[in-house]
Amino acid sequence: MNELVLVLDYGGQYKELIARTVRGMSVYSEIHPGNLPVFEIKRLNPIGIILTGGPNSVYLPDSPKCDPKIFDLGIPILGICYGMQMMCHMLGGEVSTGDIGEYGSVMIKSLNSSALFQGADKPFAALMSHRDAVTRLPEGFCETAYSPSCIAACENATKKLYGVQFHPETKHTAGGREIIQRFLFDVCCAAGDYTLDDYIDTQVEQIRRKVGKNRVLLGLSGGVDSSVCASLLSMAIPEQLTCVFVDHGFMRQNEGDEIESIFSKAKLTFIRVNAEERFLAKLKGVTDPEAKRKIIGEEFIRVFEEESAKLGNIPFLAQGTIYPDIVESGGVQSATIESHNTDESGGVQSATIESHNTGESGGVHGATIKSHHNVGGLPDKLAFTGVVEPLSGLFKDEVRILGKKLGLPPHLVKRQPFPGPGLAIRVMGEVSEEKLELLRAADAILREELDGMRERPDQYFAVLTDTRSVGVKGDDRTYESVIAIRAVTTHDFMTCEYTPIPHKFLSRISSRITSELQSVSRVVYDITSKPPATVEWE
């Protein structure tokens, strides 16, 4: 069994980044509700616990709290931002609202007396995002770093309790990765035994055990996640798998035909369902992005159910759901992990998330960022008796690694993420066939131009905004659509920076879009990073 580090969530925007950073150091991590009971923590038997940031003030009566018994377990704990404040507050310290908050890069000076800051003898820049601050430490704690305005870090080394007010998990904190590394290996004494080496064998065994001799219908989109899922399932149950590609009419230019061309030649049963009219009918008059996602998610399921009935009622539905889909949809609240065990070879902890619905027990205190169509958009009642999601414990970059191990071609493994709802959430406001055709054309121009860049962004696409703008074409006044361009650079797809595309590319893209598409009068470039924005506009 691999060692486990629990990431307890209090609504922090970086919870996924924390968990992925830990995994990147060969230590398995899972995100769980911030109020996870001590008895459950004991059952999971972690070697360490990380308390995330969050938007609340710990001194308010309804603010999220951990089980107070957590601090008596003897398990090393690292509190980050709100996590540090909560720990200090619950143990008798004081947290107050400061006159001046700290946001962005702030210089930190460590006292070099902590295991977390060994060797950090010079001031370093760290990402801060807080107005509340610890003003009095609990008994037994000492200050280990400070900023111009607050206690930046503290600890009770005897009880293995550590706190940092800044965010070491982000690349904006110099040496932040090393701070987490010291916590894992110097404080928690981690062995670093997490790898993806035995994931395939473990999942093949779990899939066979779960479905038995029953058939499985996979919702195949042609993206990285569903393609890897298809490859894994075809290895486990080749004669029992049927892949259904639902072309909802929201694909990019020629993409539906490309997907059919690739997968119809594979060693699996492939079915394409052209369903543009029914999806457009369902979205008629709908402008809210969450409503769009949920409607599309439910309609996907209804198509799958109909295809299943035609094939004699296939009992299992498979999806390429990955861990961030669940977390961003707010579904980690009541997710139960089926297994953390592996064979004695010591590989990946092949956790299978069995539930994505929130329960009465409460849990993660953060808001749903957006409902992914395959998680938050799932209807309550399914005609399937079970759901198979072999990738639901993995992050995006881990899925890509797995795809390489499965022998998938590079163009599939490296394919840019494309949302399940497709262009429906890149058309702002109500979706129509006319708007989709316009966006397809603009997006095709953008991709044609950027595909030729030497160093391409990690993801790039066009958005049809719901804004119109005055322009001039052929000496005539126009009042037409505004296209937004989005291009980002990221290593984990959980945070990103906008890509500074050279102006010669931007100028050519704008010129082509406005010249070739009569109904576009203006092109704008989105230079917002994540956070505060998300990658997608909706």
Image: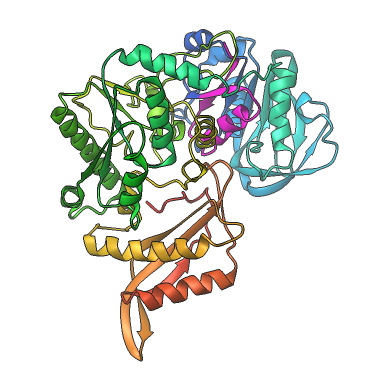
Question: Does residue 296 sit above or below 81 in this rendering?
Answer: below
In the rendered structure, which segment of residues is drawn in magenta? 1-30
Instruction: Give coordinates of residue 502: x percent, y percent.
Output: 60, 67
* Residue 156 appears in view: no
Which quadrant is home to the N terminus? top right
Question: Does residue 7 sit above or below 40 in this rendering?
Answer: below
Query: Residue, x 54% and y 51% (percent of image)?
Result: 458
Colour mode of the rendering: rainbow
Instruction: Give coordinates of residue 139: x percent, y percent.
Output: 70, 18
Q: Nearer the viewer, residue 311 or 65?
A: 311
* Residue 188 appears in view: yes
**Residue farthest toward the bottom in the current orientation of the protein:** 475
Q: Nearer the viewer, residue 522 or 279?
A: 279
Query: Residue, x 55% and y 48% (percent of image)?
Result: 496
Q: Is residue 429 magenta?
A: no
Please give the count of numbered marks on the rendered protein: 0
- Which quarter of the picture shows residue 300? top left
Q: Is residue 6 magenta?
A: yes
Q: Nearer the viewer, residue 226 or 297?
A: 226
Instruction: Give coordinates of residue 52: x percent, y percent.
Output: 56, 30
Q: Is residue 129 left or right of residue 213?
A: right
Query: Residue, x 46% and y 68% (percent of image)?
Result: 524
Q: Is residue 45 left or right of residue 110?
A: left
Question: Does residue 289 sit above or below 82 in this rendering?
Answer: below
Query: Residue, x 52% and y 41% (percent of image)?
Result: 494
Instruction: Give coordinates of residue 199: x percent, y percent.
Output: 51, 21
